[in-house]
Image: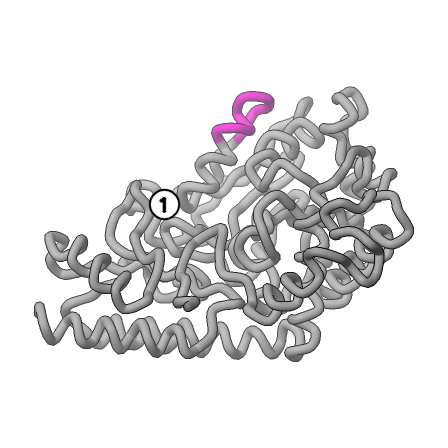
Amino acid sequence: MRKWNFSAGPAAIPESVLEETQSELLEWKNSGMSIMEMSHRSPEYMQVASTARQDLIDLLGIPKNYQVLFLQGGATLQFSMIPMNFALQHQADYLLTGSWSKKALAEASKVATANIVASSETANFNHVPDADSWNESSDAAYFHYVANETIQGNALHQAPITQSPLIADMSSVILSEPIDVSQFSMIYAGAQKNIGPAGLTICIIKDEFLATASESLPEMLQYAKHAESESMLNTPPTFSWYLAGKVFSWLKENGGLEAIAKVNHAKATSLYEFIDASDFYSNPVIHENRSIMNVPFLLRDSDMDAQFLNDAQQAGLLNLKGHRSIGGMRASIYNATPLAAIEALTQFMREFELKHG
């Protein structure tokens, strides 16, 4: 029996998508083979890939002057690919708001000059620094930030206005609500949160920005080469691309990003309101920067953590352990996690508090 999965990633996938995938796994549409066995250059697979790309364009309202790439290597590879493509001869600006922006900064610093415009590290990344405190470079190749920090559970909910081209890591928040893609020069996201299984990374790059990329890198590290080959410079992660397409279709069938945003905000509001009303649980992030996707919370007595996790497991509530770097608990409530899962979680938390509080 399936249980409620609060994993930060790889994360829950819509059950109807899994069921449809299961029905097609042995043989895809009378082709005589599984989608996993199919040539990525076959007419059948090319149609699967094209449909998935178009559905993503439709969902996000991606303008025509952007390239949409389906790549490998995870969002982590982009931490180095981005500065290699765009900042080898220039400085780049980085906003430091949590573990993932810190990793991105560290990788960029190996190949380019990286400037920290602001940091909330001294406050344990419990907020995003106010824009008035940012120290931007006058000639930066780009401004990089992480829209949603999965580990610390903080988010910058509006695209910042910056002096240089804007790049956002949206791995844990993409497709959770509408965004204005035209505000960005580049958006990238690992798949294993709201898109599908691990192994795929989406990169959305404005043509004008892409034209500034280095041409001296090995081909596999050049975004332009991937764009020219329509993400088939080499064999792409075909199964992940196929399943991502099913998730895109599921989102469209369920009303698109406007509809899923209402559900996501209702889920997050319900969980935060419960935590805030309790003196047994707490959330460390300031209100305006609270994530709608990743909700960390602490028990009043950390000695109860192991008991909480054991009892939660027994109650069918999976993967609630906080990241090892900060401890506590974390409920990741991505698109595929329904409101019923939040209701089950808060009911368990209420009963645990009554028993141990």
Along the viewing direction, whichever of 61 and 76 lies nearer the viewer: 76
User: From the viewer's perspective, is residue 266 above or below residue 357?
Assistant: below
Tell me what residue is drawn at x 35 percent, y 56 percent.
319
Along the viewing direction, whichever of 129 and 259 lies nearer the viewer: 259
Position in image of residue 191 (x %, y %): 60, 51
- For the N terminus, the quadrant is bottom left
Tell me what residue is drawn at x 83 percent, y 43 percent.
39
User: From the viewer's perspective, is residue 263 above or below residue 105?
Assistant: below
- Give the main secondary structure of the magenta stretch: helix
Q: How many marks?
A: 1
Position in image of residue 276 (x %, y %): 25, 72
SS of the residue at dot 1? Answer: loop
Q: Is residue 113 a member of the stretch shown in magenta?
A: yes
User: From the viewer's perspective, is residue 246 above or below residue 70?
Assistant: below
- For the C terminus, the quadrant is bottom left
Label 1, residues with CA under 10 Å away: few <14, some 14-19, many ≥20: some
Q: How is the image coloured?
A: one colour
Res. 138 in view: no
- Residue type, numbered disc 1: Ser
**What residue does disc 1 label?**
120
Position in image of residue 221 (x %, y %): 72, 28
**Quarter where residue 59 is shown:** bottom right
Residues rendered magenta in the picture: 106-114
Position in image of residue 129 (x %, y %): 41, 50
Tell me what residue is drawn at x 41 percent, y 71 percent.
268
Tell me what residue is drawn at x 66 percent, y 79 percent.
255
118 on left or right of 147: left
Res. 86 in view: yes
200 on left or right of 349: right
36 on left or right of 64: left
